[in-house]
Amino acid sequence: MKPRFLKLRPIPYALKEKISRELDRLVKAGILKPVRHSEWAAPIVPVLMSDRTIRICGDFKITANQAIKVDQYPLHKAEDILQL
């Protein structure tokens, strides 16, 4: 599949500072790594948690998810396994 690079989605001004701080925290923790260029990019989806913190999620619906080859091994149902 050809790489997909999607532009960012508009972010509410009220969340920009919180998102920036969370991204900085994730970089300092080694979870995220800044890159200069990438062939693949998906927009982020900021989620406001109940404690008013931000969770950064990625929307991979039309980027990486479509490129992943899923192994088609059906899982057995619990009822079928317990019939032994």
Image (tube, rainbow, N blue to C red):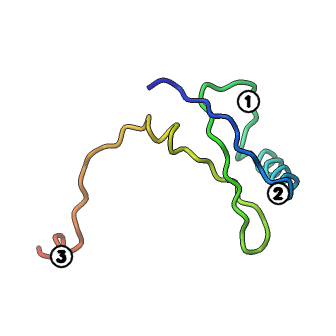
**Nearer mark to the viewer, of 1 and 3:** 1
Quarter occupied by the N terminus = top left
**Nearer mark to the viewer, of 2 and 3:** 2
Q: Left or right: where does residue 80 sit relative to residue 75?
A: left
Q: Position of residue 40 (x, y in %)?
A: 59, 30
Q: Position of residue 75 (x, y in %)?
A: 25, 59
- Nearer to the camera, 75 or 3: 3
Q: Earlier in the sequence, mark 1 or mark 2?
A: 2
Quarter occupied by the C terminus = bottom left
Residue labelled with disc 1: 35
Q: Residue at x 37, y 37 (%)?
A: 69
> Can you say whether 69 is above or below 12 in the image?
above
**Callout 1–callout 3 Cβ contact below 8 Å:** no
Q: CA distance from mark 2 to mark 3?
A: 50 Å
Q: Position of residue 2 (x, y in %)?
A: 48, 23
- Tell me the amino acid under the disc marked 3: Leu
- Tell me the amino acid under the disc marked 2: Leu
Look at the numbered disc 1 and give the secondary structure of its residue.
Answer: loop
Look at the numbered disc 3 and give the secondary structure of its residue.
Answer: helix
**Nearer mark to the viewer, of 1 and 2:** 2
Q: Position of residue 5 (x, y in %)?
A: 61, 30
Residue labelled with disc 3: 82
**Alpha-carbon neighbours of circle 2 within 10 Å: few (<14), some, or many (≥20)?**
few
> Can you say whether 41 is above or below 25 in the image?
above
